[in-house]
Image (cartoon, rainbow, N blue to C red):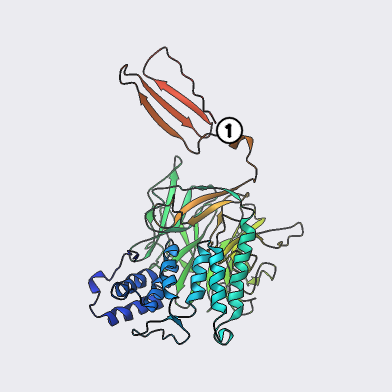
Amino acid sequence: MCLIVLPSILLAQIKDDPESIFNDAIFFYTIEDYKEAAFLFQQLLRENPENANFNFYVGMSLLNVKGQERQSIYFLERAVMFTSLKHKQRSYTERRAPHHAWFYLGNAYRINNQLDKALESYEKFQNIKDFERHYNIRIIENEIKACNRAKIIQDSPLRIRMENPGSPLNTPAADYSAVLSSNESAIVYVTSQRFYEAIMYSRKTNGLWNNPVNITSQIGSDGDMFPCFLSPAGDELYLVKKSRSGGDIYISRLEGEYWSKAQALNSNINTRSNESHAALSTDGKFLVFTSDRKGGYGGLDMYLSEKQADGEWGSAINMGKIINTTQDEDTPFFSPDGNTLYFSSTGHFNMGGFDIFFSVKNEQGNWTDPVNIGYPLNTTGDDKFFFPVKNDHAGYMSRFNEETSMGMEDIFRIQVLPLTASPEEKTKYFERDFNMEIKDKESGEILEIMYDKDADKFHIRTNKEGKTYTIKIKD
């Protein structure tokens, strides 16, 4: 049996009574602390590895942990071996999984791009007796459509360049929600700490990122604030403060070397509904934000507010049905020239979960129909928070990449490239600078070979005078 080892804050508090462990696990699952829930449910699986209910909860927990979605398949596959429509959700003695474990197994397959297996799971879910009496058929139909759209979108993949800036920005923990100044010399982002989500701030010196500073306490966050926009000058930070009931938008300002305590925006922006994100237009005159307030098209919608003469934000205006759908739109950002709007949506032509879309402002000043930015920038999982820094589909985004990530999610700089490589790209031998040293043991001669990626040239130095060398790379 495969058990995923996850860190736990309760190692010293684990009880010998399995039912108490189960109740603790259900509590953490309910408050969406999925890492803790997965750890506790796996304690129960050690003694009862065939328990479909425990397998279901482990699978569901891992499905909600970034970077662990693939591991969820193993547990959900075991869960669907024994399902029932009469599943008792909070019962320790329940050994069956709920029948909608088939649906979430389909989602796990879809997120991991196993589209045919996902469609098979959705079909089995639909074929149960009295399906329509117990489940919303429209939800399952949307997932099936997403899988079929994913196949279409993946047939025409983008060429993208993903650059991991590495340490000190990225760490073995999750690093995400990066927002930058216009010249990419200042960055604010989130790093998952052991007990909370920390807001980090760094600046570049001579092209290198300085060690990030934890500014969580400066802005007055208890680990419940998350950056959503940094002004072009890097001196105003917009944040969303999350709570069990939703979120509100706040602003903090850089005053010398320190950030001010974040202050809530006015009631035209913040309501009793969930305000999940906000960003400024390029000229600073408009605020685009997302809210599920009454009067929208459904779920989270995007709204615009204009800055008034007194500096306050005016009444919110829904951006309309071309941009908004009956489902969720979130994390909007304007391109530096203000003519492209990037955002995430579950309601447009997407390939599963949230996808990144862009809409272009036409000559009449209206936003055109949103376009899916494409695969592999978009995946069959949730893709959100693409922060543009150039006008040609270049931006920062957090991803989990098994080959290049330093741990969990890492911050990447992503550039969408032309479909056909330019002559300059074709002549480059390597993707990064490097130095290598070759020493002749008999003569003591040392050759130092240096490659300059930008110039696409090799340079050679030797400790022996009067010698010249050439390098020839054969295709």
Q: Which residue is mark 1?
A: 427
What residue is shown at x 61% (from left), y 56% (from top)? 154
What residue is shown at x 63% (from left), y 69% (from top)? 145
Q: Is residue 144 left or right of residue 216?
A: right
Residue 296 horizontal/vertical position (percent):
63, 76
What amino acid is labelled 1 in the image? Thr
Q: Indicate the secondary structure of the residue bearing disc 1.
A: helix
Seen as rendered, the residue at the extreme right is: 364
Whether residue 434 can be seen here: yes
Given residues 56 and 372, the one toward you in this image is 56
Image quarter (top left, top right, bottom left or bottom right) of the N terminus: bottom left
Residue 71 horizontal/vertical position (percent):
41, 64
Mark 1 crowd level (few <14, some 14–19, many ≥20, 10 Å Cα): few
What residue is shown at x 45% (from left), y 87% (from top)? 86
Image quarter (top left, top right, bottom left or bottom right) of the C terminus: top right
Whether residue 31 can be seen here: no
